[in-house]
Each structure stands twice: as C-alpha cells, then as structure tokens.
Image (spheres, coloured by chain):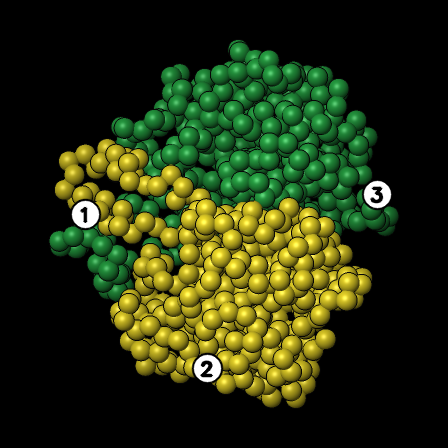
Chain colours: A yellow, B green
Amino acid sequence: MSDMTLNRRDVVITGIGIASSLGEGVETHAAALAAGGPPVVDTESFKPYPLHPLAALELDRQIPKKSDQRQMEPWQRLGVYAAGLALDSAGIKDDAEAKSTLQVIVAAGGGERDHAVDSAILTGLRDASAPGAYLNEHLMSDLRPTLFLAQLSNLLAGNIAIVHGITGPSRTFMGEEQAGVDAIRTAHARIASGQSDLMLVGGAYNAERRDMLLLFELGGYLRRGGFAPVFAREDAPGLISGSAGAFLVLESAERAAARGARVHARLDRVGAARSRRAAGTVEAALTDLVGGFGSLGPDTLAVSAATGCAGITAEEAHALAKAAPAAKRVATGDLVGHGVEAAFPVSVALAAIALSTGQAQEAVVTGAGHWRGEGAAHLVHA
Amino acid sequence: MTTHRDAKGRPLVAVTGLGVVTSLGQGKETNWQALTAGKSGIHRIERFPTEGLRTTIGGTVDFLFDEPFTAPQLSEKLATLAAEEAVAQSGLGASGDFPGELFMAVPPVEMEWPQKQEIAQTITGEVDYDGLLRAAETGRYRAMHELFVFGGVADHIAERFGTKGSPISLSTACSSGATAIQMGVEAIRRGDTPAALCIGTDGSIHAEALIRFSLLSALSTQNDPPEGAAKPFSKNRDGFVMGEGAGALVLEDYDHALARGATILGIVAGCGERGDGFHRTRSSPDGKPAILAMQDALADAGLTPDDVDYINAHGTSTPENDKMEAMSCAAVFGERMASLPISSNKSMIGHTLTAAGAVEAVISFLTIANGTLPPTINHQNPDPAIALDVVPNQARKAKVRTVLSNSFGFGGQNTCLVLTAPPEAA
C-alpha cells in the first residue's frame, strides 16, 4: 500500500550493521553468502533444540561503558552493537547533526526472564499455602529492580539512543517476524514520501534463552534434533532460532549523494501482507508481493527469511519458484538461523551485502512469520 | 470536489470516531460524566492478593470478565470495546470491513504466572525451564502460544474489524497511544490509506507488573484513601497510580470524510516526537526533548504557542515528571503559562500506560466538543515550585479550539499531539 505515494523518492542503504553466529560485519557475511555457509550450530546446550549461538563480540568497541553493558540484556547489547556497526558503516557515528534528526525504528520482542528466580518461585508455589502472598514476597525480594528495564521492548531503542547519542525519535514495533517487515516497510515509506531523510532500522534477537524456546514450543514450532537446511526439513519441520541482529541506515538518495556517502544498494520497494492463514494463503500473498516488483533480471538473488516451519516454508518456496523462477535462492536460516523480529532485517542486510559486494545485481527478500504475516522487499544495485 | 490541504500542502487528518474505556466505565458518555464530576476510578486492587506490596491500589477495569483472564485478553477486550464505539460513531465501512490500516499501541506481553503454574503442576520435583519445555512438547498447551505472542492482540483486532494491510503493534512506553495516532496521521498524509484505526490499550495490571514499577519506586504508596493517591502537580505527589483502559480513534482523510457526509469531530493537526538519550527512566533535567517535541507538534500543525487553549498534561504525579513538564511548558509558552489551563486526566483514571496517549486524546476531543475542562483532582496542596493553572478539583467551562496533549515515556520517548476543533466551527 505504501507504494501509492506521489512524489516517490529513491531510498538507498548507506549503512549495514550485522552480527550473528558467524561473527560480525559485511565481509564475514559476504563470505558466508558466497560460500553458502557453513552455519555455526549448537545442538547440545539446549538439547533437543539446536540453535545458532552468537559469536563472541568485543562489546567495548560499540558499547564503551561497562555500566551501559551491565544495564542491558543480551538481546539489547546485540542490538546496540549492530546499530553501532550500521552507524559506523554509514559514516555518521560522530555526526551529531545527523544523529539529532535520525529516526529509529526497532523491531523487538522482550527481554529475558530471570530463569533461576522463575524456577525457584514455581517450585515453591506448588506447595505454598497462600500462593498470592508467596508470589508477592518473592517477586519483591528476588527480582532485580533494573531487570524490568532490560525487558521492556522499547528499551532496545532507548539504549541505542543512550549509547550512540541519538537524539532523534524512536519507535518500537512488536509482533514477531512481521515487526521486522513493518519496521523496514515504514522506514522506507517515510523516506520515499519525504517525511524523513535518514532512518536507522533493524532488530535483534537472542536465541539462547529457554523462555523464548518455551513460547515457540508451546505452539509446536521448533525443530528438534540436528540442523537441516530450511527448505529440507520435512523429517522434522520447525524453526532453528539463531542469535542475530541487523540494522540498516536508510537515506534519501539526494541526501546520500549530497554527502558523498557510499551506497550499498537501493531499497526499491517493501510490501507486507496479513493473509488469513489457511492452506495456500502464504503462497498467494508472497506471489502477489513479489509479482508486484515487476519483471526480475537474470542476475537476481532471492534471500528467504523462511522459518522452516511446516507448510508455510514449502509455500514460500513455491511462491519464489513462480514469481522469481530465475533467481538464485538463499535461505537466511541456512546461514545464521531464524532471528524472529530480526529475521527480515537480517535478510535485507544480507541482500544489501550481496549487492554491495557484486554477488548479484538485484535481490528480492521474502519472509512468512511462523504464525502470521508475510513480507517482501526488492533491492537493486545502486 | 474541493481538495483541502494543511499549511504544508498535506491532506488534513480528520477524526470521525472516538471510543474509550477506563476504570470510570465504558464509553464516552460515562467517562465524560465522571471526569467532569471530578470522580476517581482508583480503588483498592482485588484482582490479586496485595499482601506484602507497598502499593495496593490501581485503576483496574474490573467490569468486563467474570472468569480469570490474562493481560493480553483484557487488553484485547478493552481495545475491542473502544474500537467498536469509535467505528460505530464514524459510520465508516461495513461491519468487519474497516477500509483502513490498524495502528495499535499494545503492552509488551509475556507468559504469566497462572499459566506457568498450570504447566508446573504437571512436573514432579524441582521446576525449571527444561521441565516446562518437556511439558510444552506434549502439545497440551498449544493455545498459550497465540495468547502470549507480541502480535496477538493486534492480529485479533485486525481480524475482527477487517482492517487492511499489515497491522502494527507498537510500543514507545508511556507515549505509545500518542505514537499510534501519529502513525495513523503519517499514513494518511502519505496517501497510503484513506483511514486509520488507531488504538491504545492496556489491561496489564497483575502482580508482577505492579511489582516491577514498585521496585523502580515509580508508584504512589499513599494507598489510603485510594482515590486521593494520584495528585499531579501537588507538593506531596509521590508517584503514579497504574490504570487500565483503551482509547480508539478513527482517523480519516478530511476530504474522504466530507465526501461521505461524515460528522467531523476534530482534526489531528500536528505531531511532534523527540528522543532523549539522557537516561533509561529519567528525562533530561533541562526538559529539552519535551520542549522540542511540543514545539515540533505546533510547527507541524502550522500553529504557534498562542493558538493553544488548553494542555492535556502527561501529569503522572511523579515528582520528576510533573516538575519537568511544568518547566518545559513554561519554556514553550512563556509568561502565558501562568494562565494557560493544564490538567491531568491521570488524577482520576491513573496512568493507563500504553493506552494513555490514546485515552487522553479521546478526552481532549471531548473537551473541545463540550467546552469543559476536566479538572486535576486531589489538588489540595499546590507545589509552589510549579505555578500552573491545573484546573484544580473542579471542571471549568471554557471555549477550547486547540489542545496540546503530552505523552512522555521511559526510554526517552516524548510525543506531543496538537488536536483541534473541526474547521467548520472556526
């Protein structure tokens, strides 16, 4: 819907920040894209659930103050780190003027529970004669007061502002995978329509936490056992989550040209849909979204943020086969795992890296959320 | 047909439907009666045991469920009721087929204690997350997944009202409701959608939510009497009181609304937002981001401070917010601030958190429509450091064409809206 805008301006990607199980930065991920892997998989720590653990990051490089690091949970540190890489990449990390107008959209879930506190309380509650009073007493004494701030969804954006000195406004989108799609869609629409010149958009996900595994497992969405490629999980369908964060600096083409910024790719279009999920709706929605991008060239890369979940993953493959038959297909999950809110931003970042490093001339990105929401983006070589 | 544009050449954004639910009751009429009577919706919490808690009061909405419920369920119910009222008033679209996008401020959700306890009951020995995972594997608790995903409430609202496109679930902490409205305004100005359903909802008062705010020393502990605890701008203010509720607005391209003969209730004329990189919970002591957000909102509306007739304050009743807000208003409005009325709805309904910006925008439009300023109640002990006309204790008649509504939140979120009377009343 956002492509109806009159006076549509070109939107370019001038900053890419990415960190995952593979490491950090454009070069590391360009190499993995070119080689098609291999992924880093941990099948032991959260057995029977495999996942892609975050590579060790030198946090001090992007979050210099230990006090800031301490006040964040891993997902926030990862996001702040990736956002810093993006600002560096765009060359605006020390540009106070740019950072005062920079608008931020973050796709976020929530912070990690204190698993030890939860476990002890749940054990105690079973035999408590006055469960309500027991719960109150233990939450009052056992919860760290600052834990709340590490859990609040909008505090990733808050920490990005504090650590990187961004005084422009931020918005946080929630809602699993679709939050990432809508974050990039909205950031693109704001620049294309002239509502903004400069945006920082992305998300971060920490996969190494049992509370989130529990939420997915309640719905039966996790793969068990070993790693298998996203589009070859018929034996045991499900998502393999991966710790990953990606932020992009989006900029109007005019602004980027005026400051002589290096342009990694042009973000041509971003679309989102909410199909009323039933057999075939994901395929129809994605076919429609990708079809709307017009005819794709022969040197097109298709980066899929598919989850690996039953049904919808095959539908996404069918949609790509129909709407982008000549495209070379890469699954983000085969490189870094599934990053939920970060899955689509990571996938767009990978597509931009591919264009920036000459691996393709054009790219489409697709994704279908594990339980709702479909999205697609079209990038072209700048 | 004439095409109407604002001073910047953009489509005007009209309001054609309003809906609200708070602890004072359901619907605009009920709430307006109570608000102008200076009635408080704050009471002793009975939803869960409050033994051992420093704060035992809140503006909970207790009249919607007979059975136990979770925060997302109450938030969804509140949003549904507010949106039904707003959409019905607008007369826009057919039932279940709203011709516009959905922008929704929803509280962050996570699995709650009763559900974890239910699963823990099946575990022998010590409970830990591995045990919970083994129990989850059985597939017996499948419904809990959709209950506790972040996008659940908005997805259900999108389904029920038939909104178009991909629904947005957003959070900018305590300014979320205002951000939902701002996003609707921006989408209409871009021409993406002729209409938007903008909702802020929050039904998340449970023990852990209250304890979390309590541990940050953000809540009033003056529990007795409950209705006296929220006292914005008073010298003895000691924190906010949590509240629940929802506000819903149907926004519509003004020309689209005129063409179908809709009643225009008002205009969302301007929005301003600023980040604050000062601290995770505290505002910049100089109030700069709040000042800039107010000035941005006025500039976006093409108006000046002199055009503002009334300020719907963020006014949480915390020592810090009210001081910062008063100082920031003084910086924006200068000497006029001594006589410019500013009142806080939170003195009566508490701080409805995620919903506050939307609830207070609805009340602001009722203020314009009725020509009455809702009071700041519990104002017995003015803070001499804050010289404001807070419309103390009693509602007041006033001609109001332009309202500035402020929302400020944790994480450096500052969002201000300029809300005006419909043009024909000009």
Quarter of the rendering occupied by the C terminus of chain A: bottom right
For label 2, count other residues whose C-alpha is less than 10 Å away and answer few (under 14), some (14-19) or many (20+).
some
Which SS class for mark 2?
loop
N-terminal of the pair, mark 1 or mark 2, is 2
Q: Name the residue under label 1.
A: A123
Q: Position of residue A72 (x, y in %)?
A: 44, 50
Q: Which chain carries label 3?
A: B
- Inspect the image, locate mark 1, and give the three-letter code of the amino acid beneath it: Thr
Q: Name the residue under label 3.
A: B7
Q: Which chain carries label 1?
A: A
Which SS class for mark 3?
loop
| Marks 3, 1: nearer the viewer | 1
Q: Position of residue B407 (x, y in %)?
A: 60, 35
Please tell me which residue is depicted at 18% across the width and 50% down the height of the picture. Answer: B121
Q: In this view, does B121 lie to the left or right of A186?
A: left
Residue furthest right in the image? B2
Q: Is residue B139 left or right of residue B206?
A: left
- The answer for how far apart the CA atoms under marks 3 and 2 are is 54 Å
Q: Position of residue A353 (x, y in %)?
A: 60, 75
Q: Position of residue A150 (x, y in %)?
A: 43, 47
- The answer for how far apart the CA atoms under marks 3 and 1 are is 63 Å
Query: How many tags in the picture?
Result: 3
- Inspect the image, locate mark 3, and give the three-letter code of the amino acid beneath it: Ala
The answer to whether marks 3 and 2 sit on the same chain is no
Please tell me which residue is depicted at 56% across the width and 29% down the height of the picture. Answer: B321
For label 1, count other residues whose C-alpha is less than 10 Å away and answer few (under 14), some (14-19) or many (20+).
many
Q: Is residue B423 above or below residue B105?
A: above
Please tell me which residue is depicted at 57% across the width and 59% down the height of the picture. Answer: A84
| Marks 3, 2: nearer the viewer | 2
- Residue A37, numbered label: 2
